[in-house]
Structure formats: structure tokens, C-alpha cells
Image: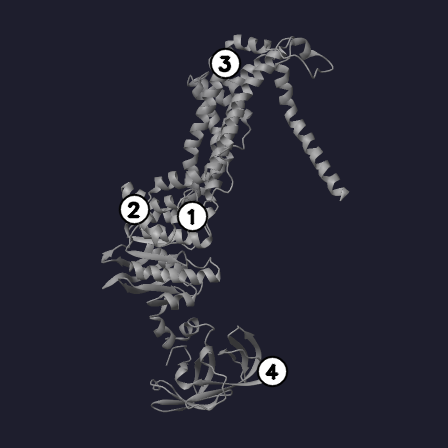
Amino acid sequence: MIYKHFGRLLHLLSLLLFLAFTLFPFYWMVSSSFKDQTDLLASPPVWTFVPSMAHYAEVWQDEKVFAAIHNSLIVASATTFLAIVLGAPAAYSLARFQFQGKKDLWFWFISNRMISPIVLALPVYLLAQSVGMLDTHLVLILIYLSFCLPIVVWICTDQFRSIPPDLEQAARLDNANQWDIFWRIYVPLGVPGIAVSAIFSFIFSWNELLYALVLTRSNVQTAPVIATSYMSGYELPWGKIMATGTLIVLPVTVFALFVSRHMVRGLTMGATK
Amino acid sequence: MEFLKIDGVRKNYRDVTAVGGVSLSAREGEFVVFVGPSGCGKSTLMRLIAGLEEVSAGRIHIDGAEVTHHEPAKRGVAMVFQSYALYPHMNVRENMSFGLKMIKTPEKEIYQRVSDAAAILKLEELMERRPKELSGGQRQRVAIGRAIVRKPKLFLFDEPLSNLDAELRGEMRGEIARLHKELGVTMVYVTHDQVEAMTLADRIVVLRAGLVEQIGTPADLYDKPINTFVAGFIGSPKMNFMPVDVVEVHPQALRLSHPALGLFNMPSERTGAVSVGATLSLGLRPEHLMLSPDALLDTLKIQVTSDYVENLGGSSQFYTWAADGSRVIALVQGRHTANKGSALEFGIALSKLYLFDAQGHAL
């Protein structure tokens, strides 16, 4: 009896520890953004303090930060939108149609993710430069698409495959054409997979640093680029960095919370048998 | 008038022939059942009629028009799937309205047709529920309702009762029979359960390995099976088969012998092809075997050794061995027991005997 309670207590403690370990960086970043300079740099660290908005005021005045967030929003939203709009129909055809070369096409999609991004950084830069697309939203969107599309296709194909094929046959008898079947049956039932791949695409595009650094100059710098641009010199403006970081994390968190509501399990229960 | 006509239809998958040259027809308003063991091609045949698969050869006509290469929706058929195939993200009303919405029927008419169908199937209380909130029987009725709403010329049922428990199955069987009487629509029903076939069908098509074995009314198939396969398939428990030797051939009768039966005469019309010394198959239905030792006229006596008896409450099923090792099963009214190894005697009317030649064809 005692052992059971002890075991559960241990379990709870280890979960709390893990939670603390995962959430601590966020806590540190958010709390630091509200500390004034002396509290920030205090050693040992200060746990209770009087909050100050000084760093946020600093960020507010620096128009580069909001411009960067704006650019990130454009790039991430466009990438996610295009990845879903292009990837979902592709996934449907891979899941349900029979055609020659299907296996090879599938492998090609997946193999796109096997390459390490840094390997292609220089060739992509030269390519973008030669067509004059450096420092544009479009070039970032296109590159990010090449990373996100395979994942969308991968997840959505699996999701669509798990939908009972009987439903499609019943719909064919109900006079539904191919588009109706896709839009009215597969998409609603595939929402969990679509939601997951949308979240993934958005987070990836939002956080991506390497290609953003390589391909942007001054016009379309995204949020991660700005955040890391402070990391030079001897006096690092920690407060400003923390405040910028907090602002950058906010949209992604909101987006993920919003979309995750659609990841409802067991959506296809009750369709058959 | 042939409402449904299937002409030499074949379906091949690579090297497997699922349906090998089937021809049959059904009249308008008839209830036809395709029955046969698993893998006999009955479901494939139904899907060919529905248009969910392309025929490899042959033609299909529905209501006078050839539909062999038509899309499923253009054939005027509705199908109830074995798995019901209800749209899980729509409620009952939306499920039943889907087909009509696809052909752009006006809202008011959709509402009316759906309400009528719901009334027939007693679904009025469940219209706002999703499939996962319904029981098996309710889902089945929704699947049927979805088909009714489209007012099809031909109703197809693909083993609709196989996922239900025994009690519900009996209830739904009655529902389907009632539906057929009420709607008067031609129905094609696929099942592996011969009880469903016997109780629901106007005519039964027995299939084996992609080919038609026999087509006939339930009574035809029971009384006059054309071969041992049909004889053994129809009727539960299965018919007993005992090998008998021909001792004498007469114009109107055969003299046969078997260790457990002795020598006996059996009237037969087709004695011409039989030669002395040939071995034939004698068919005896378990339900025709009687336990009474009274010597009734025209009764054949069978001597067997008892193995075990199953008590079914109001009847008993005897499992016995004949002297030559043949299994003999008898279904007898009343509650009986017998010790293992004890000798029993059954009697069966001569008129209830079936005779098949060495190839399994009926004589």
C-alpha cells in the first residue's frame, strides 16, 4: 500500500522535475524581460523583483523588431498556406490513386528531407542571386516550402490512408465527383493530420535561421535574424534580447494553441462497423 | 420482364478469376440473394453490378438500359455496405441528405425525403446524432435510410447483417423483409448465411469459385439441389452423404446397399445412366432422420453408433458414426441422451432421400 503511494509520489516528482526543466528557459526569458538591468545581471539570480517595462519600451522604439516580426508572419503564413494547399491534394492522390512511379514519387518527397540544409546553403544563395531574388519574401517562402511540403505530404498521406475506403465508395454511389470526395470527406476527416502538419510548417518557417541569414540583407529580415543580430560586441543588451525573444515566441504559441484544438482524436470512430 | 440482366460477366485480377462467366436475371420487385462460401465471388459480382469495379467481360442491364460501363451514380442503384460506411463527421440527417445534395436536389425536397425515410426506419429520434453515438443496429438502419432516400431502381445489400449479434440479426432480417414488401423495389442481397438466404429470397443464386451452381427458389434449392455442393450448402445442419453401391438397376428404381443401411430399393426416374457396381452418394438431411423404431412404410432404417449429443433445449443434435466410418448427424425433436458408443437406429422416409452420382450431380 505504502509502496504504491510512494511510487506515485516519485512519478509525480519526476514529472514536475521534467516540466520545470522544459519550461525553465521560457520562464527565465519572460521574467528577465521584465527585470531592470541590475536585477538581470545579479549573481546569484534574483527571484523576486519589481517588474519594469524598460526593455519593452526599448524594443518598441526599434522599428526593426516589429518589421522583422511582420516579415516572419508573412513568410511563415504563406509557407504554411501553400504547403497545405499543395500538399494535401498530393497526399490524397498518393493515398488513394494507383499510378506508375508512385513509390518512386513517394521516396523522392521523403528524400528531400534527408539532405542537411547547410549543404545547399551556398548553391541556393548563388541561384537566388543570379535571378535577383535575394532579400525577398518569395525566395524564403520557396525554400521553406521545399522543406515543409515533404512533411505535409508524409503526415497527410498517412492520415488519408487511415480513412476507410468504403466511405469513398459510398460517396461515389452518392454521385460525388472526385473533388467532392476530397473536399467533403477526406479533408474534414483528415483535419488532425492537416493541423499537425500546419503547426509543424509554421513553427519551422518561423524559427528558421540559416537560410534567413544567408538570403536576407535588410528588407526582409525575419525575427530570428533580428534576435541574433544583437549578439555582437562586448556589451550584450540582455534585456532587449529577452524582450525580443518573448515577442517572437508569442505568435507561434498562439497559432499552435489555436490549431491544436482541431487535433481531435477518434474523428473517424463510428464510420464503419 | 428482366429488370436486372447479367450476361456472361467476368472479373479477373491479374491471374485470379474472381467471377468467371456469370449470367442471370431478376424480375422487377424480386428479392434475389447471392449466397456462397467465402471467396466465391458474390461480393465481387455485387460490386460489378454497382459499378464500383469494371467488368473484364460481359454486359449488365438495369431496367432495360445497358449500364456496363456507367459510373455507379448513373446506374440508379443504392448500396448498403457490410461496414455501413457512414460519414463519421456528419450526423444522421446529413448522412442521409448527402446523396441528394450531390445531385442538387432542392432543400425542401431533401428534407421531405429524409423525413419520410426516417419515419419508415424509426430514426426520427436520432437525426442529430453522429454515427459514433449510435448502436450497430441503428447505424445499419441509417445506412439503409441513406439508400432509400435516393429512390433507387435497385437496392444492393452487401452482407449487411454479418456484424450484428444473433438476436439483432433476426430482428433486422424481419425489417428488411418488411421494407421489401413496403417499397417493392428490386433487391439484390449478398450473404454467406444460408438461413438469411432461405428466409428472405424470392430466388437464390448459389455461387462457388466465381461460377453459378444453381439458381432457384428456396424450395427448389432445398428439394431439388442439382449437385452435392448445393445440397450440402442449403440446410443447417449440413446434409449427410453416405456412399452406396448399386446392386441392381431397374427402369423405375435402383437397388442399393450400404453397411449401415442394408439392401434397399429407391425409386428413381433417371436410372438410365447408372450401371451396376457404381458408387453413388446418398443424401440425408439431419432434420428428416427420426428416432422412432416403428416400422413405417417406405422408411429406411439406419444403424449407427453414437458419438455425442448436443442439447439445444427443444431439440437434440446427434453426432454418430456409421459402420463404414461415415459421419451421420441427426436433428431430432425433444430432449434425448445417448451414451458414447451405444447403438442407435434412425429412420428416414424414402421420399426424403437424395441421390447423386460419382461426380456429385443429382440423379
Output the chain of dot 1.
A
Helix, strand or loop status at disc 1: helix
The structure residue drawn at horizontal position 42% and vertical position 38%, both measured from the top left corner, is A187
Residue at the limit of the structure toward the front, as seen here: B125
If you read the primary sequence from the N terminus, does the residue marked by circle 3 or circle 1 appear first? 3
Residue B343, by quadrant, is: bottom right
Helix, strand or loop status at disc 3: helix
The amino acid type of the residue labelled 2 equals Gln
Residue bearing the label numbered 4: B341
Q: Nearer the viewer, residue B135 or B289?
A: B135
Q: Disc number at residue A66?
A: 3
Query: In what quadrant of the picture does the N terminus of chain B appear?
Result: bottom left
Residue bearing the label numbered 2: B112
Helix, strand or loop status at disc 4: loop
If you read the primary sequence from the N terminus, does the residue marked by circle 2 or circle 4 appear first? 2
Check disc 4: other Cα within 10 Å, few if <14, some if 14-19, many if 20+: few
**Both on one chain, marks 1 and 2?**
no
Check disc 2: other Cα within 10 Å, few if <14, some if 14-19, many if 20+: few
Q: Nearer the viewer, residue A246 or A151?
A: A246
The amino acid type of the residue labelled 1 equals Pro
The amino acid type of the residue labelled 3 equals Phe
Q: Is residue A15 above or below residue B211?
A: above
Output the chain of dot 2.
B
Q: Disc number at residue A165?
A: 1
